[in-house]
Amino acid sequence: MKRLFRRLSVRIALLIVVVGPTLFIGALIITAFYVRSGRTHFPLVFLELPTLAILIPLILGILAARLVSEPLRNLAAVIASLRQNNYQAKLGSSDVQEFDAVIAEVNELGTRLAHEEKLRRDLISDTSHELNTPVTALYAQLKGVKDGVLRMDQDRVQLLYEQAERLSDLVQGLGDYASIRSSAIRPHLEPVDLAKLARRLSRHYADELKTANLTLDLNLTSQPLQADPKLLERLLGNLISNAIRYSQGTQITLTYDGSMLSVQDNGRGIPEESLPDLFERFYRVDESRSRATGGLGLGLAIAKEITEAHGWSISAENIRPGATFIIELPIPH
């Protein structure tokens, strides 16, 4: 914005500075010419030129002020609308290059704020729904036991444990999100034996992999990876868990070649229209499927935050069959 005003101010100042003195100097030259020629009659225009030299820059200044003030008024009106949470207000072109650059940024900001507001509303709705399910189940079961209608046998304990575990996962996810929003992620880098970490993840997800009829294959170089061990385990765990829940494939492959990490599956892939929003907080590709499997759509958003905290980048693409999540690592010097 400061650059915009500086450039416009320079243009207006040059316009006023050049036009006024030019007319005034022109009047002096013509007057001197008549004096040297010995003429005694001066056309009235010579008396008018100095006046015009003053009036024309004044008029140009007024016109220039109007040229600047109208887009600024429109800009101020849209900003006021954004403050009132009206994210539909948009600015039209002003036919001034500098203003149009700012207008494009303001319109983009409005679109982004509208998207964030939708995510916020979805968060409230989804959080209420996701928390309500285990809480309701726990309450109903415990009330039944308290009233003597249900027996506290081993099956009942297992059911209560599963609901409490689901509730714990949801609260943990919200806690991770709050940590990310407060920029609390600070990686403590050290050499990580990725093969050892991957074997630990294989054991951790063994039951889920078996239930989903999936295998986890490892294709890892022996080169250590400089990373925060706990954050790296969370990152890869989120990607593997995501593939287990949604890929509907038969194989997950974790690959590391020294410059790239990837988690690849041979499942049904990701809808192309979902790829740009895949790492957004609370974004879920399939609402009904996500509700059935639980979660708030935070796993991939957290994976992105962990990746960027390390100075890496993450992306997703379809490979037919399946999808792959690629983590680009900086090449060590």
Image (spheres, rainbow, N blue to C red):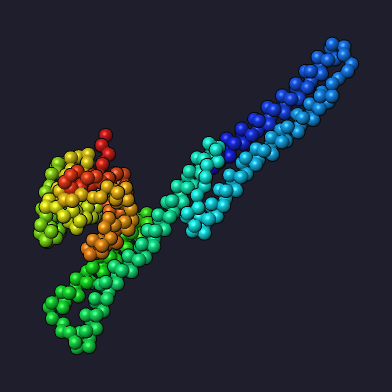
- In this view, the residue in front, 15 or 192, is 15
Q: Quadrant of the C terminus?
A: top left
Location of residue 206 (image quadrant): bottom left
Who's the residue at 32% across and 58% down the image?
A: 282
Q: In the rendering, at what x and y percent does residue 272 appear?
A: 27, 47
Say whether residue 245 is visible: yes
Image quadrant in which you'd find residue 139: bottom left
Residue at 16% x, 51% y: name it.
Answer: 267
Relative to 315, 52 lies left or right? right
Q: Position of residue 93 (x, y in %)?
A: 52, 42
Q: Nearer the viewer, residue 149 or 258?
A: 149
Task: Residue 265: tell me if it is visible.
Answer: no
Task: State the image coordinates of residue 146 (x, y, percent, origin top left).
Answer: 22, 86
Q: Check the image and report above or below for 143 versus 209.
A: below
Furthest toward the top, the residue is: 37
- Asked if residue 180 lies left or right of residue 269, the reply is right
Q: Is residue 223 above or below residue 76?
A: above
- Residue 88 x, y percent position in the rendering: 47, 54
Total number of numbered discs in the rendering:
0
Residue for point 39% across, 58% down: 118
On-image quarter of the N terminus: top right
**Residue that appears at 25% across and 37% down:** 331
Q: Is residue 50 left or right of residue 245?
A: right
Hey, which residue is sitting farthest bottom in the picture? 148
Residue that protrudes farthest toward the right in the picture: 40
